[in-house]
Image (cartoon, helix red, strand yellow):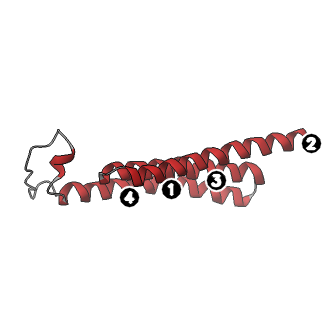
């Protein structure tokens, strides 16, 4: 009986953490003005939020074959989400002519050379 309450408490904490992560990601996506900042907010939200939500479900259901599938889903998302975010940020970097307005590290007008692509 006590073990069930402990599992319920851990599951509730993880689900609340996931809810907070998803909420801050949505707020960050709508609040930030620059596309790379928005992508960072969304990337953190889906990585950490999805991990805590699926971890809560795995703990609540116990170790079964479905739990293994959910853990593999976490691994897939942790590998694919940063790769897709990196690809989208590279597209923004090479196609945005006015990127210098958002940072102080780039020259005023950046010429895209064939070597960069």
Label 2 and label 1: CA atoms lie apart by 35 Å
Q: Name the residue tied to disc 1.
A: 77
Mark 4 = which residue?
84
Q: Disc 1 versus disc 4: distance between alpha carbons?
A: 10 Å
> Which residue corresponds to mark 3?
54
Gap between marks 3 and 4, in whole Å? 21 Å
Q: Distance between the residues labelled 1 and 3?
A: 11 Å
Residue 1 is marked as: 2
Q: Residue at x 17, y 39 (%)?
A: 105
Q: Give me the residue at 20% from left, 42% from top.
A: 103
Identify the residue at image location x=86%, y=40%.
Answer: 3
Residue 28 in the image, given as x and y percentages of width and height = 43, 49
Report the side of 4 relative to 20 (left or right): right
Q: Do tag 2 and tag 3 residues touch (Cβ < 8 Å)? A: no
Mark 1 is surrounded, within 10 Å at the Cα level, by few (under 14), some (14 to 19) or many (20 or more) other residues, namely some
Judged from this view, the residue extending furthest toward the front is 31
Count of labels in the image: 4
Residue at left offset 14%, top offset 57%: 97
Q: 4 or 31, which lies in front?
A: 31
Q: Callout 2: helix, strand or loop?
A: loop
Q: Tell me whether the residue at label 1 lies in contact with that at label 4, contact meaning CB atoms closer than 8 angstroms.
A: no
User: Is tag 3's residue or tag 4's residue first in the polypeptide sequence?
Assistant: 3
Structural distance between the alpha carbons of marks 2 and 4 = 44 Å
- Please tell me whether mark 4 sits on a helix, a strand or a loop: helix
Q: Where is residue 46 in the image (x, y as percent from the top left)?
A: 50, 53
Q: Name the secondary structure under disc 3.
A: helix
In the drawing, does residue 69 fall left or right of residue 80?
right
Q: Which of marks 2 and 4 is nearer the N terminus?
A: 2
Quadrant for the N terminus in the image: top right
Closer to the chain start, of discs 1 and 4, is 1
**Within 10 angstroms of label 3, few (less than 14), some, or many (20 or more) residues?**
many
């Amino acid at each position: 009986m006590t073990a069930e309450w402990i599992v319920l408490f851990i599951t509730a904490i993880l689900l609340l953490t996931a809810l907070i992560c998803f909420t801050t990601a949505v707020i960050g996506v709508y609040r930030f003005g620059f596309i790379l900042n928005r992508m960072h907010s969304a990337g953190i939200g889906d990585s950490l939020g999805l991990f805590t939500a699926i971890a809560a479900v795995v703990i609540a259901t116990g170790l079964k074959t479905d739990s293994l599938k959910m853990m593999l889903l976490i691994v897939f998302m942790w590998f694919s989400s940063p790769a897709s975010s990196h690809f989208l940020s590279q597209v923004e970097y090479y196609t945005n002519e006015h990127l210098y307005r958002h940072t102080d590290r780039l020259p005023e007008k950046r010429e895209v050379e064939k070597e960069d692509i």
